[in-house]
Amino acid sequence: MKATVLALLLGLLLAVPAYADSASGGGDVHVAQTLGDRELTVTLRRVTGVPGPLHVDVLTHAGSPAGTLRLSITGPGTASATAVTLGGPGSYGGDLSVDAAGRWELALDDGQEVARIPFVVAAQPVSPPEKAVYLGFLFAGGCLLAALVVATRARRGWWAFVPVGGAVAGVAVALTGAVLSTSLPLPPLPGVQVDADSVNTTSPYQLAQPLTSDYSRQPVNLALSASSVVTGQKLLLSLALSDGATGRPVDDLMVHDSALMHLIVIGPSAQLWHLHPIRVAPGKFQVQLTFPVAGHYAVAAELARIGGGVQLVRSATGIDVSGASVAVAADSSGTHVTVPDFVAGQPGTVDAHVGSNLQPWLGMLGHMIAVGPLGSGGAQAAPVWVHAHSMGGDMTGMAMAAGSMGGLMPVNGDSAPDETVAAYGPDVAFTYTFPLAGDYQAWIQVERNYRVETIPLTIHVAAASVAGQGKHSVQARLVGTGTVELDVTPSAGATVSVQAVQPTTGYSSGVVPAVATDVGTFRVTGLPLMTPGQWEIVTTVRDQSGVDEHVSPVTVTG
Ligand SMILES: [Cu+2]
């Protein structure tokens, strides 16, 4: 009897408990900063434990002067500082230490200006089911030890079954916790979904009150410190962001496309500045600018507030520049750009053959900025401002191949390749649907050898010929990886093509023709549905009656 009980107990003790994984603590944060004459990418590496080290990398681009940057952090714990000496283009690192969870601020001081980057350090969260796992196994272990003692000491062996019963209950609680911990939703991320405060950064599962509504924000007003300036003069432009409802400074910006703010300035003779103003105080950003040519400059800021989505905030004034114009050297490059015959309301793909060894800039292979249709008011009055991203070269076919955006996707919570990986190209493609007919000024931006290349181009968009009558019915369903099957009625004489769009990321594929497989059934393969989530399958049906468009939502699982 005793031997049986002992064998049973030993077996239970030797069974190693499998603890559920805790939630990933987030990845590295990349923040582009135009600090003085330097274009920098500041990377805050993931803090794996508190207290612990915070490694900061400062990447400089071609043309950035050498020198020393002082880095310091202030926040809920002890302040920490270090210095980073910058040389030629490349990455330079420094170590700081973080000893408390909460909202911190990293200051980058070049001796003249100080950029202040807010960041959130969240405590390693332990979910309630995970706690049940730990406590259940702890209780079971205690009971088993008690059972061992009872089994060896007690005169009647069956007394040992009482603590064994407790151990079984403990294991049951732990196993239930382990099962639940994989299926329970994560708490809202502080600094991303909700404001970071002292409660949710130290214990994210402890919500002060249930979130019953969305946490979206009011629109932002953008005010510029100067609206007229002289050519050739160095202007320190201040940008004030205030909340449209309260008037308070806006200080809940999230890092979006690797920057707190992307500033787009468009000059009178098709010059583009794409800069990343430094944050100097809550709601206050600044950047240095020199205008070479007299005329009007249109200004817009792209930013994202917590729960507010990405906003393009256009300055109502822009900047008027007077004085003598200075000759601007064109960014000549051997790039060959293929621009399709765009039609308003229909997607088209601009393909730029820019060559190899491209580095991801701001987490993307390529950026396309466009304004239009251009009339007498220029960019300031243009109704459409575009900032599209490239998913890679050939997006219509087997886009998962090497060199495509697929390689830029983070895997298993790791960080995506950063600017030091010069492995992309030679083609970058941008698919966009221009809503209005007319002429657009556009620029494609890519990075190579730590230098951002800007390629200007013009795009003509023709007016749509026949409007859709909505007389077709279309059913789209995902039947395999990148394969969509479509039921189209009526289908006689119809040409069917498909585009995949992911609204949350802004990715859109090229247009892929569908092949008829049966009467009324069409099939598309090789759609680059590369990230899991909600996608839209946009189907265009053409026949004698005109063009007809349908949108079917599909969910891609990872
Ligand atoms: Cu930007």
Image (cartoon, rainbow, N blue to C red):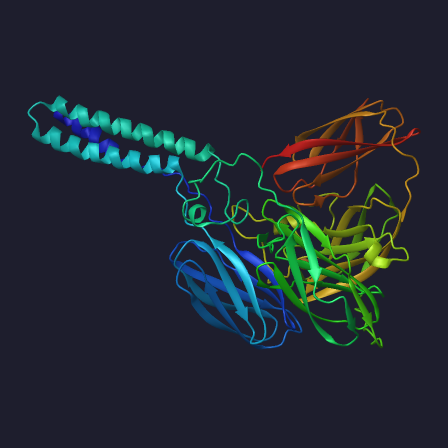
- For ligand 1, give the image quadrant: bottom right
Q: Relative to residue 254, is residue 97 depicted above or below?
A: below
- The image quarter containing residue 535 is top right
Across and down, in percent, residue 26 comes to 50, 49
Query: In the image, is 150 to the left or to the right of 214?
Result: left
Q: Relative to residue 368, is residue 503 depicted above or below?
A: above
- The image quarter containing residue 268 is bottom right
Across and down, in percent, residue 65 comes to 62, 76
For image coordinates 81% across by 61% down, the residue present is 456
Taking the image as drawn, is residue 16 in sight? Answer: no
Q: Quadrant of the N terminus?
A: top left
Q: Quadrant of the C terminus?
A: top right
Q: Relative to residue 552, is residue 393 depicted above or below?
A: below
Residue most extreme to the left: 155
Across and down, in percent, residue 218 comes to 64, 46
Query: In the image, is 111 to the left or to the right of 99?
Result: right
Q: Relative to residue 225, is residue 488 depicted above or below?
A: above
Query: In the image, is 288 to the left or to the right of 252?
Result: right
For image coordinates 55% across by 44% down, the residue present is 193
Across and down, in percent, residue 60 comes to 60, 69
Residue most extreme to the front: 246
216 vs 550, nearest the viewer: 216
457 vs 196, nearest the viewer: 196
Taking the image as drawn, is residue 261 in sight? Answer: yes
143 vs 487, nearest the viewer: 143
- The image quarter containing residue 261 is bottom right
Q: How many marks?
A: 0
